[in-house]
């Protein structure tokens, strides 16, 4: 298992993984994914086993020294094997190296697995955004103070 940067020919695979990870309304379109990845403030990490992509993380640097997790996706058959940990460690280390202050993200209110994953890493729920997702699902905003 190793991490590497995004390559243009990864896009279709990332799209397929995102479609498998999230229900319609929460998953991204191919165009949305391409726009997030291509944005000048964004960083993408790819987790690979051999030449197979098993997970990825997209993050975007926001005002007030926040690194915002756009999405983290791990193939179902690879979950609970620390792929998510590897990806989040890389993103948090990247943020610390740039003196960013805080990590932030949104997660669906009913995505209890993801909330447990984030809480195990020191994230806390700060508030809800009703109707955040296209399918009407409420999101939790979760943050982690990188100085702690
Ligand atoms: C959330 C997600 C990224 C976690 O990735 P992962 O590779 O399975 O996570 P890890 O193996 O690194 O887990 C680290 C710790 O987080 C916690 N955790 C992770 N998944 C969990 C689950 N389903 N239930 C309870 N705790 C969980 C555990 O404490 C775990 O440590 P342990 O396995 O030693 O108990 C993955 O489940 C996923 O891709 N889900 C679908 C997409 C998604 O919901 N992404 C988040 C969107 S906001």
Image (spheres, rainbow, N blue to C red):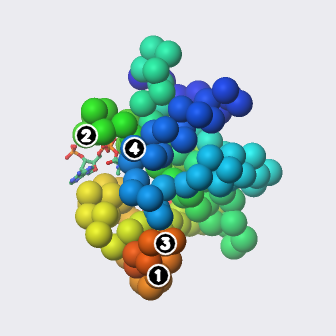
Quadrant of residue 22 in the image? bottom left
* Sequence-earlier tag: 2 or 4: 4
Classify 10 Å Cα crowding around label 1: few (below 14), some (14-19), many (20 and above). Answer: few
Residue in view at x 63 percent, y 66 percent = 66
Q: Is residue 101 visible?
A: yes
In the image, residue 79 lies at what x, y percent? 29, 39
> Considering the numbered disc 2 on the image, is that residue within a helix, a strand or a loop?
loop
Where is residue 148 shown, x and y percent of the image?
45, 65
Q: Is mark 2 within 8 Å of ligand 1?
A: yes
Tell me, for residue 80, which label it has, or none: 2
Which type of secondary structure does the marked residue at label 3 adopt?
loop
Nearer mark to the viewer, of 2 and 4: 4
N-terminal of the pair, mark 4 or mark 3, is 4
Residue 20 disc label: 4
Q: CA distance from mark 1 to mark 2?
A: 29 Å
In the depicted view, which residue is nearer to us: 60 or 11? 11
Is any part of residue 46 visible from this angle? no
Of pointers 1 and 2, the one earlier in the residue sequence: 2
Q: Residue at x 67, y 26 (%)?
A: 9
Look at mark 1 in the image and give the residue it sits on.
131
Q: What residue is drawn where x is 30% and y is 39%?
A: 76
Residue 49 rendering spot, x and y as whole percentages? 42, 20
Which residue is the site of mark 3?
A: 133
């Amino acid at each position: 298992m190793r991490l590497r940067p995004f390559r243009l020919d990864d896009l279709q695979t990332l799209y397929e993984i995102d479609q498998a990870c999230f229900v319609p309304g929460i998953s991204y379109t191919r165009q949305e994914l391409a726009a997030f990845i291509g944005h000048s403030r964004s960083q993408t990490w790819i987790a690979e086993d051999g030449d197979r992509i098993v997970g990825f993380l997209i993050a975007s640097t926001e005002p007030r020294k926040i690194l915002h997790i756009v999405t983290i996706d791990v193939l179902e058959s690879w979950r609970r094997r620390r792929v998510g940990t590897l990806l989040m460690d890389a993103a948090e280390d990247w943020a610390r190296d740039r003196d960013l202050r805080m990590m932030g993200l949104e997660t669906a209110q009913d995505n209890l697995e993801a909330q447990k994953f984030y809480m195990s890493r020191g994230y806390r729920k700060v508030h809800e955004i009703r109707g955040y997702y296209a399918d009407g699902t409420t999101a939790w905003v979760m943050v982690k103070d990188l100085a702690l």
